[in-house]
Amino acid sequence: MRPPSTKPQNIKIKSELPLLALRGAVVFPRIAAPLFILDKASLKAVDAAMKGDRLVVCTTVNKEKSGPLTPADFYKVGVVAKIRDMVRQPDGKVRVLIEGIDRAKITGFVKADGYIRVKLAKFSKPKFEKNEKIEAQMYNLVSQFKECVNMGATVPFDVLLIVMNITDPWQLCDIITLNLEFKTAEKQAILEAESIEQKLDRAAISITRLIKVLRMSKKIQTETGKELGKMEREMFLREQLKTIQKELGMLDGKSDEDDMSEKIKKAKMSKGAEKQALKELARLEGMPSFSPEIAYIRTYLEWLSGLPWSIKTASKLNIKQAEKILNEDHYGLLKVKERILEYLAVQKLVGKIKGPILCFAGPPGTGKTSIGKSIARSLGRKFVRMSLGGVRDEAEIRGHRRTYVGALPGRIIQGINTAGTKNPVFMLDEIDKLSHDAMRGDPSSALLEALDPEQNNEFADHYLEVPFDLSDVMFITTANLLDTVPPALRDRMEVIEFPGYTEDEKFHIATGYLFPKQLKNHGLTEKNLGFDESGLREIIRSYTREAGVRNLERQIASVCRKIAKTVAENGVKNTVVKGEDAQKYLGPRKFTSTLKEETDEVGVATGLAWTEAGGEILLIEATRMIGKGKLILTGHLGKVMQESAQAAFSYARTKAGDYKTTMDFGKNDFHIHVPAGAIPKDGPSAGVAMASVLASLLVGKPLRKDVGMTGEITLHGKVMEIGGVKEKVLAAHRAGLKTIILPKNNEKDLVDIPEKIKKSIRFIFASTIDDVLKVALKK
Ligand code: ADP
């Protein structure tokens, strides 16, 4: 294209001219453009024009069509143009240079000798005044044009200069349109515009669309460019690595694939797995080195060949030895140890792990993990641990299929990989925190398949695609509470309970195990630091309130840290921590008042609860106000607990007469609250306590706070059996209660309670609420 001529052209346009058909191009007035003449009719038209005044009408064909053109195939607005130059090329094509003169409307077609002549009507550009809006539109158009150029639209430099300097908006639109890749229909529409406003609008629409296209194409380019760049870099580095390794004599000319094939051989996989691995390796070798799949296949092969298909630690199973190790590492836990030794003995006789999976159930810090480690030690096996807390996707247990981006094996196979042997002791923690999401498959059924000794010799991980034999793994699961463990899983497990420790047991664990361990951890010896009995007991009583010993261990560590600091600063010093020193090292006491010291109140009962953290004391409160006989319940109570409150309420209402009260149920509302309000609670065992607080309100007498109570109640006031007796009794003991009311049917559970505690607490076994109130209600 050429810059537009600035002189107005005073050529008189005849009313009939030869037609030059354009395909995919539009010519504009006052702009020169080179054209190729392709069809015979147009060639003849050019010849005819060349014989005369060299004028033609350039009109664009409005559809794609082969064969002779008819009048319907043309847009009805064209441009009268002068042929400035004509060159016949050696290949027979004709190139002409034409210069647009003015727009014209085609009003009729006349057949001539082998070409078309058309009748014309004048259609010059309208007159217009430039105003601010037009200026603004011009400004926008120019800046969008520049943006196009920046994004890679190819435009000759002189055109760029013209566009930036032009003052005529009409011509600006024409030049931009001619030089950018607008669609033919868009170009034609801009040519045909009736007014400057219309022309500017149409140009703006087209250029905005073009910018979108350019942006998108740029984005695609940079993305593929990045991908390619990364791959090329990787390839290059690999090659370099190979050369370096060769230079250093590390590789003796072997390729990555040779290496991999060796790894596969060494892994001694199962037959099926090896076949699969070799197949994938062959696929890898046949791939061009820039294929993005290479990385995926390599990772897969690394996983396959890295698994301990046939690596086992020689398992020694000597029951005497095992007993010794369990005792060495743990104080007490007699029942637990006994159960474990029985389990191991059966295994020794059978020769293989068969039968139920062990499940250690109990509050945190009661030694579950640490017993697991001891079992591994006594068997001479590796120990791995994997938490199932929050797992709700089957794929987390069983892996993602390889087609999934970023796929990896599931947690079971990952654990085996970490262990590096196929017969570790594998602890699956928090099996009670496994959740279930219907959308993502059921993780517990995948888990069952992994744990079940009958079928886990062919455990199918989605990522591996080939089965892995888990039958040598000794699985142990742990849970805080068994209620939430899916029933199908629970059925397959043999539960061993870790109920929590008494103060005495804690004291022995602290002296014999926790303290020596922490001394060592802090680089101290017994010369630097010691505890006397009062010191440890003070920490147990006033700085911890827990079923296990986790906090206790933390507090001891805390003292060790402080001593280590003074030892490091001032040299060896023999410190013995006594009860009265605890505050010096650990700050103010965390748990002070015991319940028995608090005053008794009307409508407050001491309930005993059983939570994940072991047993706990719950103060249950009730109050009444003027109302209409409603029951209000607060404190984040679960459904079962709410129903149990309803039962207690109904019982109290039916029995109101017996209590010689003048209170009218219909004219009062009752409110039961169980602190702490933010912690969710559930279960039926607070029924007795809730009935008692209501009764206490009715008769206006306080309940004794030093009497702990637990039990489910029926609508008729019978007291029913509950669970977690040992935990609850231990919690009551920690809180210093002197009397505990238990359901009559729980009397049998007292065998689990240490003698010392049994002696310090008075147990009352109740069959009805009246039995409870006789003891708990103050006279
Ligand atoms: P859990 O797995 O039940 O939460 P841990 O096994 O982590 O508890 O125990 C917490 C800490 O208490 C560990 O350092 C453990 O060695 C110690 N511990 C727990 N019970 C005993 C015990 N009976 N004898 C010795 N140490 C114990």
Image (cartoon, rainbow, N blue to C red):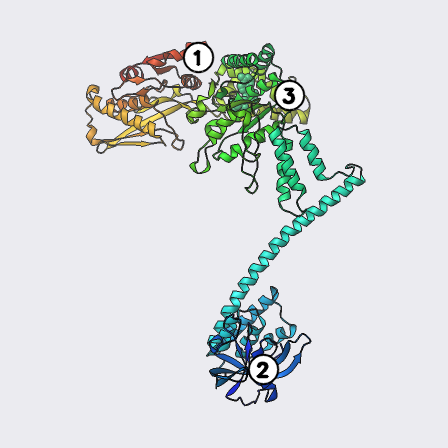
- What is the quadrant of residue 41 in the picture? bottom right
Where does label 1 land, which residue? 752
What residue appears at the point 32 percent right and 18 percent down from the top-left corner? 720
Amino acid type of the residue that numbered disc 1 sits on in the rendered structure? Asp
Where does label 3 land, which residue? 313
Q: Is mark 3 within 8 Å of ligand 1?
A: no
Task: Report if residue 458 is visible in the image.
Answer: yes
Q: Nearer the viewer, residue 545 or 415?
A: 415
Instruction: Describe the element under mark 3 as helix, strand or loop.
Output: loop
Q: Earlier in the sequence, mark 3 or mark 1?
A: 3
What residue appears at the point 63 percent right and 31 percent down from the top-left corner? 274
| C-alpha separation, residue under disc 2 versus residue under disc 1 | 115 Å
Is 508 above or below relative to 426? above
Q: Nearer the viewer, residue 379 or 598?
A: 379
Instruction: Describe the element under mark 1 as helix, strand or loop.
Output: helix
Amino acid type of the residue that numbered disc 3 sits on in the rendered structure? Thr
Amino acid type of the residue that numbered disc 2 sits on in the rendered structure? Lys
Task: Report if residue 128 is visible in the image.
Answer: no
Count residues near mark 1 (Cα–Cα under 10 Å), then give few for <14, some for 14-19, many for 20+. few
Is 130 above or below relative to 231? below
Q: Nearer the viewer, residue 73 or 249?
A: 73
Q: Is mark 1 within 8 Å of ligand 1?
A: no
Count residues near mark 2 (Cα–Cα under 10 Å), then give few for <14, some for 14-19, many for 20+. many
Is 508 above or below relative to 73? above
Q: Position of residue 558 (x, y in %)?
A: 57, 26
Where does label 2 land, which residue? 44
Q: Earlier in the sequence, mark 2 or mark 1?
A: 2
Q: Nearer the viewer, residue 727 or 239?
A: 239
Q: How many marks?
A: 3
Q: Earlier in the sequence, mark 3 or mark 2?
A: 2
Q: Position of residue 475 (x, y in %)?
A: 54, 23
Quarter of the image where the N terminus is located = bottom right
